Image (cartoon, rainbow, N blue to C red):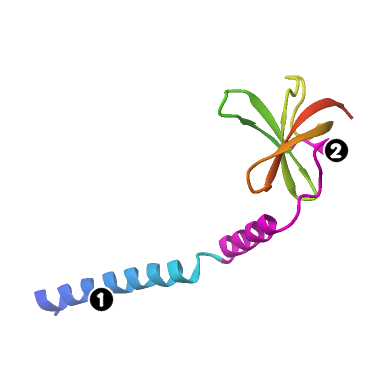
C-alpha cells in the first residue's frame, strides 16, 4: 500500500511529465501540420506577388469575410496569393468564378485588394 508521501510523489511526477511534454511540443513548434503551415506562410511572405496593380484576373470565391468597415468581401487566390475582393454582388456565392481587377497591396505585399468586375 502506498503512503501519503508516495501518492504525492506520483502526482508530482505526473505533473512534471505533463509540463515537460508541453514544453517539448512548444519548443519543437507544435504539430507537423502547424510547422508546415508556418513554413508555407514564411515562404509566401518572401515571394513576389504573382499579380500587379491593374491586372485583371479570374478567381473562384473561396469564402466571404467581413472587412473592418463592415463591408462583405470575397476571398480568392491567384497562384496561392490571397486577394480580397470588394463590391461583390450579394448574388455571388462560394465557388462562383469571377473576374476582378487588382487595386492595391497590403503592407508587405502578402495580399491584395481587388474590385469585382463580372461573373465569369
Which residue occupies the foreground of this view, 76 or 45?
A: 45
Q: Please give the residue where the numbered disc 1 appears in the rendered image.
A: 13
Which residue occupies the foreground of this view, 101 or 30?
A: 101
The residue located at (57%, 23%) in the rendering is: 70
The residue located at (68%, 59%) in the rendering is: 46
Measured in 3D between alpha carbons, the distance from the residue under mark 2 to the one under mark 1, in whole angstroms, is 61 Å
- What is the quadrant of residue 37 in the picture? bottom right
- Is 80 situated above or below 114? below
- Is 70 situated above or below 74? above
User: Can you say which quadrant of the picture contains the N terminus?
Assistant: bottom left
| Start-end of magenta stretch | 32-61
Q: Are marks 2 and 1 in contact (CB under 8 Å)?
A: no
Q: Position of residue 101 (x, y in %)?
A: 82, 32
The residue located at (44%, 66%) in the rendering is: 26
79 part of magenta stretch: no
Q: Position of residue 93 (x, y in %)?
A: 75, 28
- Numbered badge on residue 78: none
| The furthest residue to the right | 120
57 part of magenta stretch: yes
Q: Is residue 68 visible?
A: yes
Where disc 1 sits, the SS reads helix
Tell whether 65 sits left or right of 114.
Answer: left
Q: Please give the residue where the numbered disc 2 appears in the rendered image.
A: 55
Q: Which badge, 2 or 1, comes first in the chain's sequence?
A: 1
- What is the quadrant of residue 32 in the picture? bottom right
Q: Position of residue 110 (x, y in %)?
A: 67, 48
| The furthest residue to the left | 4
Amino acid at each position: 500500500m502506498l503512503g501519503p508521501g508516495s501518492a504525492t510523489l506520483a502526482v508530482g511526477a505526473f505533473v512534471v511529465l505533463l509540463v515537460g511534454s508541453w514544453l517539448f511540443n512548444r519548443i519543437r513548434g507544435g504539430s507537423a501540420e502547424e510547422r508546415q503551415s508556418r513554413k508555407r506562410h514564411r515562404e509566401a511572405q518572401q515571394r513576389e506577388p504573382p499579380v500587379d496593380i491593374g491586372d485583371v484576373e479570374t478567381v473562384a470565391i473561396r469564402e466571404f469575410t467581413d472587412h473592418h468597415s463592415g463591408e462583405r468581401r470575397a476571398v480568392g487566390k491567384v497562384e496561392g496569393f490571397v486577394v480580397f475582393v470588394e463590391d461583390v454582388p450579394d448574388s455571388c456565392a462560394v465557388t462562383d468564378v469571377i473576374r476582378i481587377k487588382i487595386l492595391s497591396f497590403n503592407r508587405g505585399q502578402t495580399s491584395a485588394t481587388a474590385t469585382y468586375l463580372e461573373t465569369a
